[in-house]
Image (cartoon, helix red, strand yellow):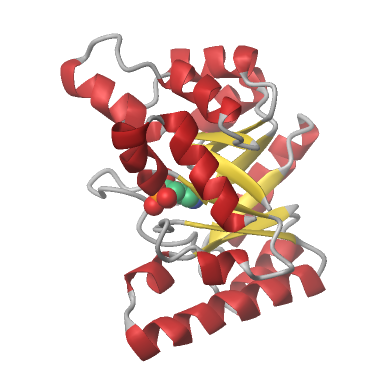
């Protein structure tokens, strides 16, 4: 199972003081030594954590998959085409949110997303869409040319008891359906050392994208160790 480690929170701590430390580029290197198969950063419009400089340096030093999460805007498309990450994950973005709150509204934004995917494809960049576990969103993702989808696991992560089992089934069905229609399927958001196991057991899944929980553990045990522990769990 591919593990993409999101290092945005390292930059969040740095930006709290507008200083040079901790450096997400160093964190990425150590995460890779701990077994990360990829590094993810979300360059937000307001640059609240990751900066353009981080992305450029990561492109130079990350030998594994560099996944750029971004909103489907002209500015971000220009940056992606210039920096050339290994893949782009399109996500919805709202200024007021603490983190990405839901999947893309692929139905409402169908034509716009189709055009953005085409521009990224023309530059040779594979595209993943971050979507809710709905069959209709998967159909539309396929129709507009996405290569992959990342199924939002936030509802699963936030639910309890029977409700959580219901949300797990929705994720499982969405992953299977995505693979059936010919998309690669990933999952992410809200996954922790305590809730990841049932998701990691989904055979059709290509990979998991995890940030908060790994970086939180890294504060206590170091990032190499935190990544190693997550990698062992999901294998
Ligand atoms: N996948 C996507 C598309 C995200 O936006 C995020 C959060 O930046 C994650 C995965 C990681 O979520 P978490 O930090 O809750 O592990």
Residue 61: image location, x then y, percent: 61, 14
Question: How many numbered circles are shown?
Answer: 0
Residue 209: image location, x then y, percent: 54, 49
Residue 217: image location, x then y, percent: 34, 41
Give above or below for 30 relative to 107: above
* Residue shown at 25% from the left, 26% from the top: 13
* Residue shown at 73% from the left, 35% from the top: 125
Extreme-top residue of the structure? 20
* Residue shown at 75% from the left, 52% from the top: 147
**Camera sees residue 216:** yes
* Residue shown at 32% from the left, 70% from the top: 158
Is 97 situated left or right of 217 in this image?
Answer: left
**Camera sees residue 91:** no
Of 208 and 15, which appears nearest the observer? 208
- The C terminus sits in image quarter: bottom right
Residue 53: image location, x then y, percent: 45, 12
Give above or below for 145 relative to 78: below
């Amino acid at each position: 199972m591919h593990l993409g480690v999101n290092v945005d929170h390292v930059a969040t701590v740095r930006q709290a003081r507008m200083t040079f430390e901790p450096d997400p580029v160093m964190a990425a290197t150590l995460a890779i030594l701990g077994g990360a198969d990829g590094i993810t950063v979300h360059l937000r419009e307001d640059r609240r954590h990751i900066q353009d400089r981080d992305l450029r340096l990561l492109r130079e030093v990350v030998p594994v998959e560099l996944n750029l999460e971004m909103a489907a805007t002209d500015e971000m498309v220009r940056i992606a085409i210039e920096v050339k990450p290994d893949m782009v994950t399109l996500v919805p973005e709202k200024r007021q949110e603490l983190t990405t709150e839901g999947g893309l509204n692929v139905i409402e934004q169908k034509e716009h997303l189709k055009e953005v995917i085409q521009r990224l494809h023309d530059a040779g960049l594979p595209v993943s869409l971050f979507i809710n576990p709905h069959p209709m969103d998967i159909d539309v993702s396929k129709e507009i040319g996405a290569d992959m989808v990342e199924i939002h696991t936030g509802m699963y992560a936030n639910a309890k008891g029977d409700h959580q089992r219901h949300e797990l089934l929705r994720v499982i069905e969405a992953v299977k359906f995505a693979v059936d229609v010919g998309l690669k399927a990933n999952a992410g958001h809200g996954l922790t050392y305590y809730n990841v196991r049932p998701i990691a057991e989904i055979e059709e899944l290509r990979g998991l994208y995890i940030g908060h929980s790994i970086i939180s553990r890294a504060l206590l045990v170091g990032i190499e160790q935190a990544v190693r522990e997550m990698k062992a769990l999901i294998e």
